[in-house]
Image: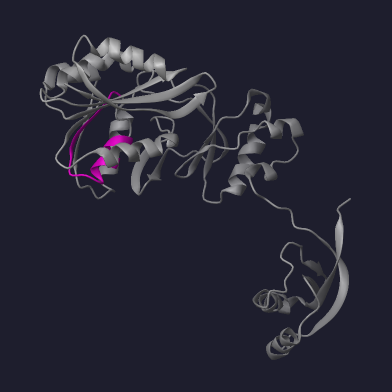
Amino acid sequence: MVEKNKMSCIVVRKYDAEKAIKVLRKHRLLATDFKVMRCKDVVKIPTIKPLTKNVKIAFNNEGILFKETIDYFERKSVVKTYKDLVKNIPREAIDRLPSSYDIVGEAILIRIPEEAMNYAQIIGEALLRFHKNIKGVYAVTGETYGEERLTPLKLIAGNSVEKTVYVEHGVKFVVNIGKTYINPSLSFEHYRIGEEVSDGEKILDMFCGIGGFSLTIACRKKAEIYAVDINPYAIRSLISSLKINKLKGTIYPILGDSAYVFSKFFNKTFDRVIMNLPGSTYRFLKYACRVLSDNGGIIHYYRFAEAINEVIFEFLKLISSFRSVVKILNIRKVIEVSPRKRLYVIDAYVM
């Protein structure tokens, strides 16, 4: 049984209800936490206290006939998160649902615990009601895999979103949902690197994806950026994004295998190399060193590990075969992937 509260209220004709609510709201007498009651030709509107003289005058000026009385009103349900809209599934399943998820343009990507996957459609529909501008909700059904860095997705509510525009720090990214890698959790990292770059730099973004680093830099700095990726959809997305952003710098999108591209076309020409392929960055460090300027430059080395010491040891051991590290500029945890898996970055000035 729904609990109701005894409250002051007014009774007005239904065609006067909107005007009456407007007057009550203006005078801060409307009990906004409670539901209005509609009864045939009249409407009962809850008030926080009996009407003041000024409100009665305002009603008379608007031609609103009213009657003051007392009645019982139901409190409005408070919707703070999408979980408040999830109905007809066990409470323990709701409690295990994630509080966070990725909003990518008109799509939502959410990781649903295995024990709640039977209720995926209900969860997806709740997210659609909570976010009015979302067209499709996808469940992330596994880990990112393969050279093209694809994330397995399953549409659980709404319509399929093949292509959308995602905005990050004012930069617009065209995204092919399910065919390109995107991680909004890297938003601050894109911004951080973009702020560190100086005008005039020549930069290699070794695994650019849809251009998270490249576009963020080019929108802020007069830099020359070579953006390479093996995923054709990622390069197409980047090319599309070039047309919808105002760039200060220049981006050259390149489709191909990083090792092949570097060894064939570049030789000690870059001031900065971005290496965001954390699952296997170590395999490409020698190529980054090969294309870094003889005068030295900066390498951003991203790596998954349980602890930062593992990344430092690996980086120093590997790079000693190719270059000398002049200075490690920064070491930080970028994001926590799981309790035993974190994404770290080392920013190193290398000679």
Q: Position of residue 191 (x, y in %)?
A: 34, 41
Q: Which is nearer the eye, 57 or 326?
A: 326
In magenta, the rendered stretch is: 211-230
Q: How many marks?
A: 0
- Residue at 78%, 80% in the rendered image: 51
Magenta stretch holds residue 161: no
Please tell me in which quadrant of the rendered image residue 218 appears: top left
**Is residue 215 in sight in this rendering?**
no
306 displayed left or right of 274: right
Q: Position of residue 11 (x, y in %)?
A: 82, 77
- Residue at 72%, 74% in the rendered image: 29
- Residue at 40%, 39% in the rendered image: 187
Q: Position of residue 272 (x, y in %)?
A: 20, 29
Q: Quadrant of the C terminus?
A: top left
Q: Is residue 192 above or below residue 20?
A: above
Magenta stretch holds residue 212: yes
Q: Is residue 214 above or below residue 67?
A: above
Q: Which is nearer the eye, 302 or 72?
A: 302
- Residue at 26%, 38% in the rendered image: 196
**Is residue 95 in sight in this rendering?**
yes
Q: Is residue 227 above or below residue 64?
A: above
Q: Position of residue 174 (x, y in %)?
A: 35, 41
Q: Which is nearer the eye, 74 or 274?
A: 274
Q: Which is nearer the eye, 100 or 319?
A: 319
